[in-house]
Image (tube, rainbow, N blue to C red):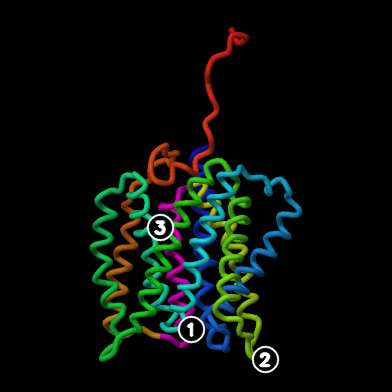
Amino acid sequence: MKNTTRNQGIGAALASALLLGLIPIFGKQALLSGYSPLVVVTVRSGLAAVLLFGFMLFQRKYFYIYPVGLVGCVLAGLINGLGSILYYYALNRIGAGVGQLLYSFYPLFVAGWLLLDRHAINRLTLFRLALALPGVYLLIQTGHARVDLFGVGCMLASAIFYALHLIVNQRVLYEVPAPTVTFYTLLSMSLTVLTAYMLFDRSLPPVTASAWPLLGMALVTFLSRLTLFMGVKKLGGLQTSLLGLGELIVTIVLARLWLNENLSVLQWIGAVFVSGSLLLVGLEKSTPEKRHQTGWLAWLNPPKIPTTEYPWRN
């Protein structure tokens, strides 16, 4: 039974990774078509939420969630919404390939958040971080010039937010089905980015802009979110995020073939460092995920049911 659950989690996490690898490509295409970053993230999230709501209408049992769990999903959606805004602002300033390489650090940020939440982190994870840091430095080099440092900072901040939202949702997923967590998190995320759009943008897309990149992003977001949280539920946030690095390969290949992006020699060396850090996941020991009663996110645990013996049970 444990192997079956683990295999299902691995399959869901890999499927999510393959789908997520398409998002930077669609996103960059939309930005090049003339859409602003806030328009891209708002339409993408909103359409994905509508698709998921349609799915939930046929499975109405998934609408139920306990109050603290709902608060956790709203918090995760807020965090991921802010991270998504930073992501598309970064993607508007740097290439999709380089951006995804930088974003691929989110598993190490997941490990950092877990450490703060009183989870044990092994030495191999720390070694992987030390190996990857030189890779980040080389990735932001482009010969005589540098990649836009503001864009780099936004992308790394986005990865930090994405990692945090996984950890918050992991707490909720112990008791709540993955579609339920996906729906309320995505709904909260959509409201967050819509609020940002109404406050800071309100621009309309160009008349000549193609809508298909946005439609593709919405569909991919809908499917990838369902598989992502299914993986988190069955494997845990850290293992799912490590498997999710497969999206990096998809993005790099498509960025080269579709967007004609390429890396400089220094950036390829940096990519080797990062890839080496990622490949070491095969040496990571997988430990069964269990609920932690302590840590700064312990308030997301459901209330304990008293186990006192009653006289009439005797």
Residue at the spot x=49%, y=44% of the render? 300
Whether residue 189 is situated above or below residue 238 in the rendered picture: below
Circle 3: residue type: Leu
Q: Which mark is residue 25?
A: none
Closer mark to the observer between disc 1 and disc 2: 2
Q: Measuring from the top left, give residue 215's x and y in whole percent.
A: 65, 75
From the viewer's perspective, is the residue at label 1 or at label 3 nearer?
Answer: 3
Give whichever of discs 1 and 3 has the lower sequence position.
3
The range drawn in magenta is: 235-261
Of residue 203 and residue 107, the one placed in the foreground of this image is 203
- Judge from the rendering whether residue 29 lies leftward or rightward of residue 264; answer left or right: right
Kind of residue sitting beneath label 1: Leu
Give residue 242's mark.
Answer: 3
Circle 1 residue: 257
Q: Nearer the viewer, residue 142 or 74?
A: 74
Residues at marks 1 and 3, CA–CA distance in whole angstroms: 25 Å
Measuring 50% from the left and 59% from the top, which residue is drawn there? 14
> In front: 268, or 208?
208
- Tell me if mark 3 has few (under 14), some (14-19) or many (20+) residues whose alpha carbon lies within 10 angstroms of its own: many
Residue 62 lies in the magenta stretch:
no
> Do callouts 1 and 3 mark residues in contact (Cβ within 8 Å)?
no
